[in-house]
Image: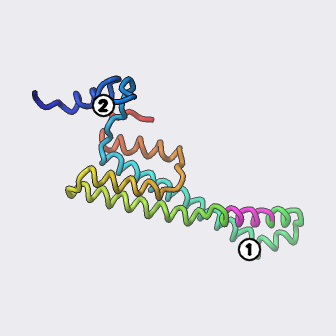
Amino acid sequence: MGERTEAEQSRLETEPGRGHQGPTTNYPTAPKVDPTFKLLFSALYHDMAETTLMRWHRLLTMLNLLLGSGAAAAIGARHPNWALWMGLAVALIGSLQLVWDFGKVARDHAVLRQRYYDLMADFQRGKSAKEVEACMTALYGAEPPIIERLRKRAHNKAGRSLYGGKFNRI
């Protein structure tokens, strides 16, 4: 019997009742995804997350410094109501930064991005897909919660980059 083409194998793996045996044979199996796509998607996601969170960190730090500065105090001396609101804003911004620590989370994303790019380079150098998948599984456990909007953008960007206009966007 001859070898199956990639398209035939993909059809068999996703067609209900085909591709595997067991109690779920009436349900389709998940399609196989190219490791290069998974790696690029993950690297792009962490790049976008790092950029977004670092922007928030810098903006909040700038506002905290400006509202807590001597110039703000001078304005507060002339306008007592503003002083109250500026003090409240400084406390709120400082609390946000302490609780969510956008700068640290952005650095975590930077480290994960680099690790995914390193894995992609290893895969391109000949590391097996099975080894790369195992390393990716370990990295998934270190990831912070997903930002859904960024996940969709990274998915579409990776797909367009690798597959052009033939890619199904989400």
The one nearer the camera, 125 or 62, is 125
Residue drawn at point x = 76 percent, y = 62 percent: 89
Extreme-left residue of the structure? 1
Occupied quadrant, residue 166: top left
Mark 2 vs 1, N-terminal side: 2
CB atoms at circles 2 and 1 under 8 Å apart? no
Q: Amino acid at mark 1?
A: Ser
Left/right of residue 23 with respect to residue 34 in the rendered view: right
Q: Identify the residue position indicated by label 2 in the image.
A: 20
The answer to which image quadrant residue 122 occupies is bottom left
Q: Quadrant of residue 120?
A: bottom left
- Amino acid marked by disc 2: His
Specify few, some or many for label 1: CA neighbours under 10 Å numbering under 14, 14-19, or 20 or more: few
Within the magenta stretch, is there residue 38? Answer: no
Q: Is residue 135 above or below residue 11?
A: below
Marks 2 and 1, Cα distance to the nearest angstrom? 66 Å
Circle 1 residue? 69
Q: Residue furthest front?
A: 23
Give the SS element for disc 1: loop
- Total labels drawn: 2
What x and y, as percent, mark residue 167?
Answer: 35, 35
Report whether 103 appears left or right of 48.
Answer: right
Quadrant in the picture for the N terminus: top left
Which is more toward the observer, 57 or 35?
35
Picture quarter with the C terminus: top left
Q: Main secondary structure of the magenta part?
A: helix
Compared to residue 57, the image places residue 170 above or below, namely above
Which stretch did the figure color magenta?
88-96
Tell me residue 98's x, y (percent). 66, 66
Residue 130 vs residue 86, the one in the foreground: 130
Secondary structure type for disc 2: loop
Q: Residue at x 23, y 56 (%)?
A: 127
